[in-house]
Amino acid sequence: MARIPEDRHGTGVVGDLPVWENAVSERLRGALFRRGGVVRRQAARSHAQAIRQAFDVRRAGLDAPARTLSGGNMQKLILGRPACPGRKHATADRDAPADRASADGR
C-alpha cells in the first residue's frame, strides 16, 4: 500500500526540491535509492525519468523545482511515486471520493 496525499501542495511534494528528489522522497530509506547513507542519485533520477514517461508528466525537467509543475502534472508525479518493481499500476477506489486514491500493490 502506498500513500497518496490529499493535499498535493501541502503534503504531496516539497516545492523547493527538484522533481527527481520528490519522485523518490518517500522511498529514500530503502536500498533501491540509498547505499551506506548516500543517495544513489543515478538510480533516483532514472526512476524519476521513468515516472515522467509512464505518467506523462510534462513541462518540467528533472532538476526543476516541483512547485513549477502544474496541478495536474503534480498529481501525476504523486501518483507515479509509488510505482516500483512488483506494482503494475495505481488505482483509485470507485467508492471513495475522487481525491482519495491508492496504489495497487499487486
Image (cartoon, grey):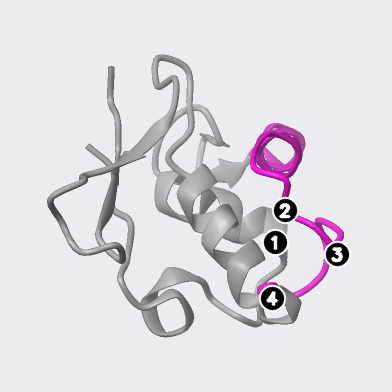
Q: Secondary structure at mark 2?
A: loop
- List x then y, in percent, for residue 47: 66, 35
- List x then y, in percent, for residue 18: 72, 67
Q: Which residue is mark 3?
A: 59
Name the residue at the front extreme.
94
Q: Which residue is mark 4?
A: 70
Q: Nearer the viewer, mark 1 or mark 3?
A: 3
Alpha-carbon span between mark 4 and mark 3: 8 Å
Marks 4 and 1, the one that precedes in the sequence:
1
The quadrant where residue 87 appears: top left
Q: Are marks 4 and 2 in contact (CB under 8 Å)?
A: no
Q: In the image, is residue 46 part of the stretch drawn in magenta?
A: yes
Q: Are marks 4 and 3 in contact (CB under 8 Å)?
A: yes
Amino acid at dot 3: Arg
**Residue 27 versus residue 21 in the image, above or below:** above
Comparing 20 with 82, the one in front is: 82
- Residue 51 horizontal side relative to residue 25, left or right: right
Q: Are marks 2 and 3 in contact (CB under 8 Å)?
A: no
Q: Which residue is mark 2?
A: 57
